Image (cartoon, rainbow, N blue to C red):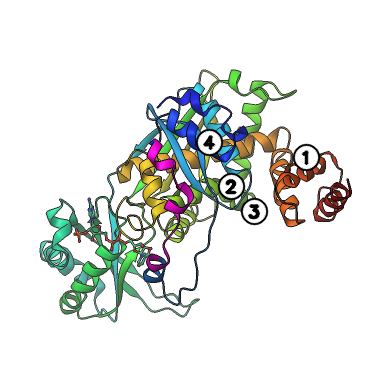
């Protein structure tokens, strides 16, 4: 990648941006012709994707720049409606790349399928029987989806969980069997669901219980991705704040989000700003990722920050984050949606593990940017600057009026819709 062609990307026109991507060798010249139409979801495809389809719903697709992850350059596709997310991610990535970039470690990808049974009279005995029949259970699961086995994946092991009756919630005892399944490049929901439904009757016959359901768990605790960054204080200086002050304040802000759930939710929402944008652009299931990530944030028994910020022995700021990230590079709408197909090309056709590495790094970068702004100049300065354009458009500005109104709006004390309308009227009168 010839990264230098992407400098000042935000200042370029739409056409210049496409040419910059060609010059940077990120996309091909032929990709640029009829670019927008090629990325649109055809009506026929949309109609087959969901029920009762009447139209498509568009979001802006932008690119996160400066990402240097595990010694590799990336231009990251991000689909989001929120201003400032991409700017914040890119500016964090710019600082972190100067410090050597993100380093990641990605767990071997294993998904969990659950079968819940009730009325198992002797759970201890049932557990022994299940574990004695682990090979047969695995075999039956694999027979239900032989193609994933042929590819080198499939069911690997079986675990049992006994959940006691809970009077407070009026819930009976449940006997739960987890099948650990490797779904390779797929997120695997359908592969797993097919397998667990197929073994349900066998598990009923082994335990004497009644199966309530068989389905994957979106709490993908066996598919974890970790990103780390080390940032020297020399890169942290901001306005009147020294690098040491910014580092210490970021650490304090991180500690606050560890202990206070009210802050942790907002802190993690900021992380998900970046994560969701890449998950969505890559054609993956945002709800599956959101549900798993937030559950993981409660693993200590309290909802806490997903990230951790500390001081290294040499004084660097160290950021680290581990989250469940069961994303795929095949399956679902990934190879159907033209936007998702393009996103995959933009990322250089990554493996699912590599995609995890990119997404967890974007999340950590997003968090760094938000914390740095919060503990220095505050979040509103950058955010409202970008929000001004949305206000200008909401006020009815079109074409050149958008920049004129938003630039004037930024100078005003009350940056709101009423002021945007007032400015627009004044511009129209000139
Ligand atoms: P698919 O059902 O599309 O299955 C993926 C398919 O990709 C496999 O069947 C496999 O085909 C094919 N494939 C090709 N190459 C590979 C490879 N290298 N590794 C693995 N598979 C490969 O998708 P998923 O099972 O991943 O399910 C994801 C979808 O399920 C998403 O759309 C999600 O929204 C949805 N979903 C989510 C749920 C949840 O999260 N709770 C519940 C239900 C659905 P082959 O059979 O030939 O091997």
Tell me which segment is drawn in magenta.
29-45
Q: Is 241 on the left or on the right of 26, as rendered?
A: right
Q: Tell me the residue that label 2 is attached to.
A: 270
Cα–Cα span, label 3 and label 2: 13 Å
Asked if 165 appears above or below 40 in the picture, the reply is: below
Q: Is 294 on the left or on the right of 422, as rendered?
A: left
Q: Are marks 3 and 4 in contact (CB under 8 Å)?
A: no
Which quadrant, please, contains the N terminus?
top left
Residue at 67%, 35% in the rendered image:
373
> Which percent across, then down, holds residue 385?
72, 41
Badge 2 crowding class, 10 Å Cα cut-off, few under 14, some 14 to 19, many 20 or more, is many
Cβ of disc 1 within 8 Å of ligand 1?
A: no
Tell me the number on the disc at residue 262: 3
Cα–Cα span, label 4 and label 1: 22 Å
Q: Earlier in the sequence, mark 4 or mark 2?
A: 4
Which quadrant, please, contains the C terminus?
top right
Cα–Cα span, label 3 and label 1: 34 Å
Q: Tell me the residue that label 4 is attached to.
A: 17
Badge 1 crowding class, 10 Å Cα cut-off, few under 14, some 14 to 19, many 20 or more, is some
SS under mark 3 = helix
> Which percent across, then down, holds residue 292?
43, 57
């Amino acid at each position: 990648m010839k990264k230098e062609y992407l400098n000042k990307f935000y200042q370029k026109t739409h056409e210049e941006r496409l040419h910059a991507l060609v010059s940077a060798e990120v996309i091909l010249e032929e990709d640029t012709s009829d670019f927008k139409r090629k990325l649109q979801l055809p009506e026929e495809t949309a109609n087959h994707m969901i029920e009762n389809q009447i139209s498509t719903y568009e979001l802006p697709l932008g690119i996160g720049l400066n990402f240097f992850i595990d010694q590799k350059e990336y231009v990251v596709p991000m689909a989001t409606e929120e201003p400032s997310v991409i700017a914040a991610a890119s500016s964090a990535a710019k600082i972190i790349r100067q410090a050597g970039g993100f380093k990641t470690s990605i767990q071997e990808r294993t998904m969990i399928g659950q079968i819940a049974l009730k009325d198992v009279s002797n759970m201890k005995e049932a557990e022994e029987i299940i574990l004695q029949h682990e090979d047969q259970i695995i075999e039956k699961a694999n027979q239900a989806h032989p193609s994933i086995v042929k590819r080198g994946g499939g069911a690997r092991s079986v675990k049992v969980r006994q959940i006691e009756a809970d009077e407070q919630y009026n819930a009976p005892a449940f006997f739960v069997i987890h099948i650990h399944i490797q779904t390779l490049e797929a997120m695997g929901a359908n592969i797993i669901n097919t397998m667990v439904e197929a073994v349900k009757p066998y598990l009923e016959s082994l335990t004497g219980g009644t199966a309530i359901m068989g389905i994957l768990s979106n709490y993908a605790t066996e598919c974890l991705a970790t990103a780390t960054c080390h940032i020297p204080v020399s890169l942290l200086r901001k306005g009147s704040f020294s690098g040491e002050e910014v580092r210490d304040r970021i650490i304090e802000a991180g500690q606050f989000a560890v202990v206070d759930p009210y802050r942790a939710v907002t802190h993690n929402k900021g992380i998900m700003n970046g994560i969701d944008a890449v998950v969505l652009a890559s054609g993956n299931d945002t709800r599956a990722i959101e549900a798993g990530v937030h559950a993981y944030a409660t693993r200590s028994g309290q909802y806490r920050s997903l990230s951790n910020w500390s001081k290294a022995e040499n004084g660097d700021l160290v950021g680290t984050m581990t989250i469940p990230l069961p994303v795929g590079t095949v399956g679902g709408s990934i190879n159907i949606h033209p936007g998702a197909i393009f996103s995959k090309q933009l990322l250089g056709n990554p493996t699912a593990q590599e995609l995890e590495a990119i997404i967890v790094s974007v999340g950590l970068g997003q968090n760094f940017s938000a914390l740095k702004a919060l503990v220095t100049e505050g979040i509103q300065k950058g955010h409202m600057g970008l929000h001004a354009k949305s206000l200008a458009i909401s006020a009815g500005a079109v074409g050149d009026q958008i920049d004129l109104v938003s630039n004037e709006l930024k100078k005003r004390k009350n940056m709101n819709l009423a002021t945007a309308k007032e400015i627009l009227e004044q511009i129209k009168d000139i």
